[in-house]
Amino acid sequence: MPIKLPSFRQRREAYPPDLWTKCPSCEEMLFNRQLDKVRRVCPSCGHHFRLSAAGRLDLLLDAGSFEEHDEGLQSLDPLEFVDQKPYPERIAAAQAATGLRDAAVWGFGRIDGRVVAICVMDFAFMGGSMGSVVGEKVTRAAEAALEARVPLIIVSASGGARMQEGTLALMQLAKTVGALERLRAEAVPFISILTDPTTGGVFASYAALGDVNLAEPNALIGFAGARVTASTIAAELPPGFQRSEFLSEHGFLDRVVHRFELRGEVSALLRYLVPATFEEPAADTLSVPAFRPLSFLSALADRVMPDLEPEEPRPNGPLPVVAPVASTPATTSGQAATAPATPTGQAAAAPATSLAAAGNGPSPRAGEPAAPGQEAIAVEAGPASARAHDEEPRDG
Ligand SMILES: [Zn+2]
């Protein structure tokens, strides 16, 4: 007969929150120290918990490579703002709770040996809200990236602009976007990583402007809240609204990346996104309004295979220049196709004719066979490639 031992341990009804965390997705109780070891990703369902600024830097950067800049920046209270308590008291409480001066940290670090300027946000500091300090750090990170010609990485985790700083917080939208625009103009890459949550003014400014926008799974990303949006448009919102996967399906994000793969993904991107240097001031990128995979790939091909020149030099430059010339009334393909000078009367003859007219080459003799193949293909590709350049492929 088994002996029944008395239970010495009282049954725990409530788990102390400093030791345990309940997964909001699968409701499993997770031991905090264990959760930290697995980068705060639920081992049973893969739910991504929020990560602190320090945890994020540790995740992305080579160990020990981070050098923080402007760590002393701190919010003032020029508006003397008081809600339930004065703004300086809120700041002090958040500083005590997180050990941070404000909701963003920036500096230089390395990813697989490549130097980057990186700015990470911490949601635990007043909801990651963007006041003048966060805006200033993002801006300085962008300016330093430009000066050093290294890629910029910003990891967002924010509820939006900081209400306690009023219009000063709103001004950060313009300031940060201005700094990023200078990066773009000088062809220095910017990778934006959106984590849970990225909403409000942060989403409406720098977070959505990356050359590549990555997001963690199931992150809340959007401008206004779901309830506000639903009541504004007076319609029921689709399932998964404002979540990473939904935004990715609709072309707003380039990729949704699991936290464990994030570092590898960023590292791979950095191999392709090389900043333009001072020596070659990106003649091909200055005329391009934004980073686009097509122009990027053709520029890359030019560097890798510079010998692949077209057989016949085209004095009028690249194909997109030819296309408009070919469409002038005298040489429109429709007219050329019906022109009596083209003996075959086939439409295939038209591109060859218009190419010759566009270039300075000799006009084709009337009896010449139509379309020596390559030229016709080149011109036919002309309008198509011009069209491709006008598009903004965002759904990579
Ligand atoms: Zn879970």
Image: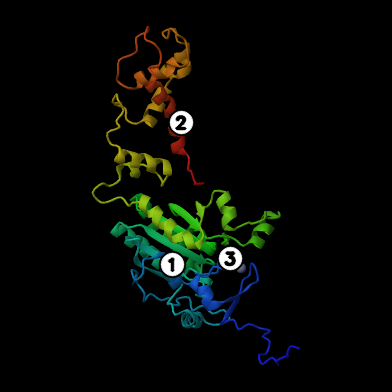
Labels 2 and 1: the sequence-earlier one: 1
Q: Which mark is residue 47?
A: 3
Q: CA distance from mark 1 to mark 3?
A: 17 Å
Q: Which percent across, then down, holds residue 246?
A: 60, 53
Which residue reaches farthest right?
A: 1
- Visible in this render: residue 377? yes
Question: Is residue 226 positioned above or below 4 on the image?
Answer: above
Q: CA distance from mark 2 to mark 1?
A: 43 Å
Question: Is residue 189 positioned above or below 156 on the image?
Answer: above
Labels 3 and 2: the sequence-earlier one: 3
User: Badge 3: few (under 14), some or many (20 or more) residues near its Cα, within 10 Å?
Assistant: some
Identify which amino acid the numbered label 3 is placed on. His
Residue at screen point 30% across, 18% down: 361
- Visible in this render: residue 175? no
Q: Which percent across, then down, holds residue 251?
A: 54, 48
Q: Which percent across, then down, holds residue 191?
A: 42, 56
Q: Would you say 288 lies left or right of 5 here?
A: left
Ligand 1 position by quadrant: bottom right
Res 298 quadrant in image: top left
Front: mark 2 or 1:
1
Which residue reaches farthest front?
A: 1
Question: Is residue 206 positioned above or below 303 on the image?
Answer: below
Residue at screen point 58% across, 60% down: 218
Q: How is the image coloured?
A: rainbow
Q: Which percent across, then down, holds residue 304?
A: 30, 40
Labels 1 and 3: the sequence-earlier one: 3
Q: Secondary structure at mark 3?
A: loop
Identify which amino acid the numbered label 1 is placed on. Leu
For mark 2, what is the residue? 384
Residue at screen point 56% across, 62% down: 219
Residue at screen point 38% across, 22% down: 374
Q: Which mark is residue 59?
A: 1
